Amino acid sequence: MRARRMSALLLLTVLAACGGSGSSGFDIGPGGFEATLIGRAITENRCVEGADDLLICPSGVPVRQGDPTLLGPNELRVDAGFAGEVDCTSDVCMVSLGIAVEGLPAGAVVRVAVRAAGADVWHIGEPLAVSSAGGGHGLETPVVGGAGGDAMAGDEVQVAVLVFVPPLDPVPAEVEELSESGARYAFVLAPVALTPGVSP
């Protein structure tokens, strides 16, 4: 049975660093091959296969029933988008991210990963309170830009909504590539600039 459309609201928090790259997010660096796949998925608006069985899709592009990569009976769709203006106080910038999930496989877990665009490290947040049981509600949870931070006001950040399916393994707080997280699906957004007072 198709899970009802669920929504979650989270607060994306990125701590400032001593500097940022300001790059496009598609650079090739150490462990940066996945960045090319993410760029291809966004540019071509389609899902692409990554390493370790990770399927990388742009936000809003569904994994359809019958697709051999779909580990559930339904179409899986994750829509994510920024809402409101970037709020920067001191060295901390925050912006709301709205998330809607449809067709979540039974027992699956949703988390959000964030990185400074072009950086080597993704920071993974705690599980969001969405489930395959359906229903909709809002929540706020911080996703931290890492020890010392990766981005400051004016820099670009990139966000991915990760879906983990059973059997669930421990999830690291930081990874160089999303495929190292153990996620089965990554729904990615294009990089956005953290400009205080401006909606991304």
Image: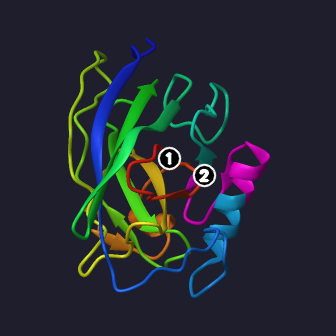
Mark 2–mark 1 distance (CA, rounded to whole Å): 22 Å
What amino acid is at disc 1? Pro
Q: Residue at x 42, y 28 (%)?
A: 100
Where does the image place residue 155, in percent across and percent down from the top left?
48, 69
Query: Callout 2 environment at 10 Å: few (<14), some (14 to 19), or many (20+)?
Result: many
Q: Is residue 122 magenta?
A: no
Residue 88 in the figure: left or right of residue 97: left
SS at circle 2: strand
Q: Tell whether label 1 touches label 2 (CB within 8 Å).
A: no
Furthest residue to the front? 197
Find the magenta span and give its range.
40-55
Label 2 or label 1, whichever lies nearer to me, is 1
Q: Residue at x 55, y 64 (%)?
A: 52
Where does the image place residue 62, in percent across and percent down from the top left?
61, 31
Q: Is residue 54 magenta?
A: yes
Residue 16 in the figure: left or right of residue 179: left
Q: Residue at x 62, y 46 (%)?
A: 57
Question: In terms of sequence position, does the residue under pointer 2 or pointer 1 come before the other?
Answer: 2
The disc label shown at residue 200, or none: 1
Q: In the image shown, does 114 or 196 lie closer to the viewer?
A: 196
Number of labelled discs? 2
Q: Is residue 77 above or below residue 31?
A: above
Where does the image place residue 82, in percent across and percent down from the top left?
44, 40
The residue that label 2 is drawn on is 56
Residue 66 in the figure: left or right of residue 99: right
Answer yes or no: is residue 169 visible: no
Quarter of the image containing the N terminus?
Answer: top left
Residue 93 in the figure: left or right of residue 3: left
